[in-house]
Amino acid sequence: MKNHFRLGRNLLLVSFILLALQPFGLREASAQAAELFVSPSGSGTDCTQANPCDAGQAMTNAVTGDTIYFMGGTYTSTNDPYLVINKAVSLMGGWDGSPTGDVVVDPAAYPTTLNGEDTRSLFTVNDTSGAGELITITGFTFQNGKIYLSGGAIRVREGRVTIQGNIFRENSSDNYGGAIGVESGFDVQILGNSFYDNEVVYGGGSISIGSSDPDNTTCVIDGNYFSGGYADYGSVISNSSSTMIVNRNTFVDTLGESVIMVSSTGPTSIISNNFIIRPAQNAIHLMNSSSVPHQIVNNTIIGSNYGLFVYNNALVNVVNNIITGTNQSIRFTGGTLTGSNNLFYDNTSDPNPLTDPVYADPEFIDPLADDYHIGEDSPAVNAGTTVALDEDYDGDARPSGGGYDIGADEIEGGCLAYLPLVLK
């Protein structure tokens, strides 16, 4: 049976990651890999568990495949950025600091906060080896990072990176990517993180994507929670040049012109299984031509100016979405717009309903509590068309029962055990 927890799937994913890191002895490292240890006051040179060092020393000592553990505490520095990651290593926050015994990692019990003090950026990833070996960053709180160009918390200049299970709070940029700025020619994954009130002047309040090799790289943004934040456009995500997959995220109470801005020419974006709730202006904004149509599939959009805004030669396919409470559900002023089986309700106007629209109350479980899962009697149940997705927002199988449902949620089987969805 399906259980909808109040914190939502994205926060559950973060919880799962943290639970996976709950106190335990980490398995023995391979013969090729070493473990290095960092603390806020570390002054050692060998970076051992008994004699931790600072982050810069650990990076100097590390080689490809090593793991660097950061002891819980608050880290500040006069270095800008705080740390350059120039090797394919794993960085993990939440170490308990014990000088002997098993290495215990618990980010909830031992939060590891990197504080840029609104003066400097925090991590720059710049692995110029060209090997494309994986860098992982997990278990940190990035706070008050600031940069002029892109990536107040993490600037990904070069390297293949997974950023997972972190918190990004009140980071900023004078231009792009308040929390994360992606410039890399390798794939980047941003998974199960929480973002609060990150902002920029121009695009990508939380994440800006501008790959140096857009035709051969993919940025995956999956299972994250976004609250607040501001940008002139793309108050959360701005993609100017990369294949992008935005799947199973929650966006709440964002400011600025649009939550997600896609302006890339060439690469395609897939935006699916997301809840976009009360944006100040528009939910999804797409412009410029792409090699194949952008796919807007099985999202639930609640209360905005425009649910979708498509213009300037954009190629867009819009299928199985719920759009409700907007001034205009889909605004189309140029390009190619196709799609079907979208549900519209309580919008001031629906000028572009596409094929086989559904006009009905979606019968959400508890909208007053910000739970926008659909109930068993919702007209969205089995009303969608066949799509390539095999899971919904919660990770439940899609389709389930008699057909594909409309929106981010798929009713599971014939019965539903309910605990509410949302939000912090």
Image: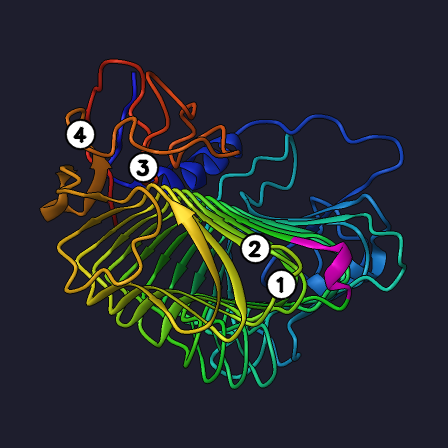
Foreground of the two, 276 or 119: 276
Tell me the quarter of the picture where residue 413 sits: top left
Q: Residue 372 at what x, y percent from top left?
A: 22, 42
For label 1, the residue is 290
Question: Which segment is the magenta one?
Answer: 213-218
Near mark 1 (Cα within 10 A), the count class, few <14, some 14-19 or many ≥20, is: some
The reply to whether dot 2 and dot 3 touch (C-beta < 8 Å) is no
How far apart, in angstroms, are the residues tagged by discs 1 and 3? 26 Å
Secondary element at tag 2: loop
Q: Residue 225 at what x, y percent from top left?
A: 39, 51
- In which quadrant will I find the N terminus? top left
Q: Residue 367 at what x, y percent from top left?
A: 13, 45
For label 4, the residue is 375
The reply to whether dot 3 and dot 4 touch (C-beta < 8 Å) is no
Whether residue 159 can be seen here: no
Amino acid identity at mark 1: Ser
- Residue 215 in the magenta stretch? The answer is yes
Whether residue 87 can be seen here: yes
For label 2, the residue is 293
For label 3, the residue is 406
Residue at the spot 61% in from the left edge and 83% down from the top edge: 149
Q: Residue 165 at what x, y percent from top left?
A: 51, 46
How far apart, in angstroms, are the residues tagged by discs 2 and 3? 20 Å
Residue at the spot 51% in from the left edge and 86% down from the top edge: 174
How far apart, in angstroms, are the residues tagged by discs 1 and 2? 6 Å
The reply to whether dot 1 and dot 3 touch (C-beta < 8 Å) is no
The outermost residue toward the left is 368
Secondary element at tag 3: loop
